Image (tube, rainbow, N blue to C red):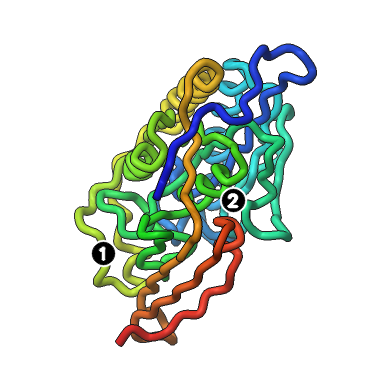
Amino acid sequence: MVTEGGPCGLRRGLGREEDKMRIYLMTDLEGVAGVIDFENWCRPESRYYELAKEFLTEEVNAAVEGFFAGGATHVTVVDGHGPGAISPKLLDPRVELLRGWPRGWPLELDGSYDAVAWVGQHAKAGSEFAHLAHTQSFRYLDLSVNGVSIGEFGQLAFCAGELGVRCIFGAGDEAFTKEARELVPGIETVSVKRGLTPGRGDECTAEEYMRRNYAAVHLSPKEACRRIREGAERAVRRAISEDFGLVRMDPPYERVTKFRPYEGQPWPTLSVESHPESFAALMNMPYDPKPTT
């Protein structure tokens, strides 16, 4: 069962030392405006990787501007893309940059934060009309917990809920923003591009799925940043006065993960794990995939 909660942990009366508003900002690369495909834009060896990092960091800085304008007093920017994609040289000097999480989930998020936000986020695997959709890697067909299908956004959102931290803002492709609003009612979202490919792509191997969802219509990077800045400010102002963004799932937890065929593994596999009390602990459990056919 998924439940919603109120403004747990949000400190009011900003301006006093004890009333700081701390935001944990998760970032990724595939949901950024102008990032066209995976092969040419999302790997360190890609021809446009440095430009992609600039686009992401500009979107992050736009969100940071909005957060501070809305009343935030601290922002931790989390570089969540596999090989890293934030340009520290270009990053707003007011923020802290987090890269690396030796304890796994919840990725160094803790109850000292008041809110979680996302920039550059892509939709989960199997999303229709998504751009560069995947969950962790293109090998994933679906990941669900207690029957609720979730992607990278949902995994962090439920970890945040377990800590009493609200989810207030998300920017990425249109399919992601739809996913976010369905899972976290009231969350402020900004779409910076929209995918054009219909269907889920369940028939694809991992290699085929990586190339399946390249078609999209993008905002210009400048327009994307303008909308992100405005949306981020709205999110903080709303979070101060409104009751939204806390989402929890009741224990016990069961994770069911379906994997696509990929090179070296020519058939689909399934992995099932459970934990009696902690969502984050479940996310840290190793997978044990077994053939489904």
Amino acid type shown at disc 1: Gly
Percent across and percent down for residue 285 are 58, 69
For the point 50% across and 56% down, the residue is 251
The relative height of residue 234 versus residue 24 in the rendered view (above or below) is above
Q: Is residue 139 left or right of residue 24?
A: left
Going from N to C along the chain, the mark reached first, 1 or 2, is: 2
Q: Which residue is denoted by mark 1 in the rendering?
A: 201
Amino acid type shown at disc 2: Gly
| Quadrant (top left, top right, bottom left, bottom right) of the C terminus | bottom left
What separation in Å lies between label 1 and label 2 (alpha carbons)? 25 Å
User: Within 10 angstroms of label 2, few (less than 14), some, or many (20 or more) residues?
Assistant: many
- Which quadrant of the view contains residue 103? bottom right
Point out the residue furthest to the right here.
Answer: 17
Q: Which residue is denoted by mark 2 in the rendering?
A: 80
- Front residue of 153 and 84: 153
User: Within 10 angstroms of label 1, few (less than 14), some, or many (20 or more) residues?
Assistant: some
Percent across and percent down for residue 31 are 44, 45
Q: Which mark is residue 259?
A: none
- SS of the residue under disc 1: loop
For the point 32% across and 70% down, the residue is 208
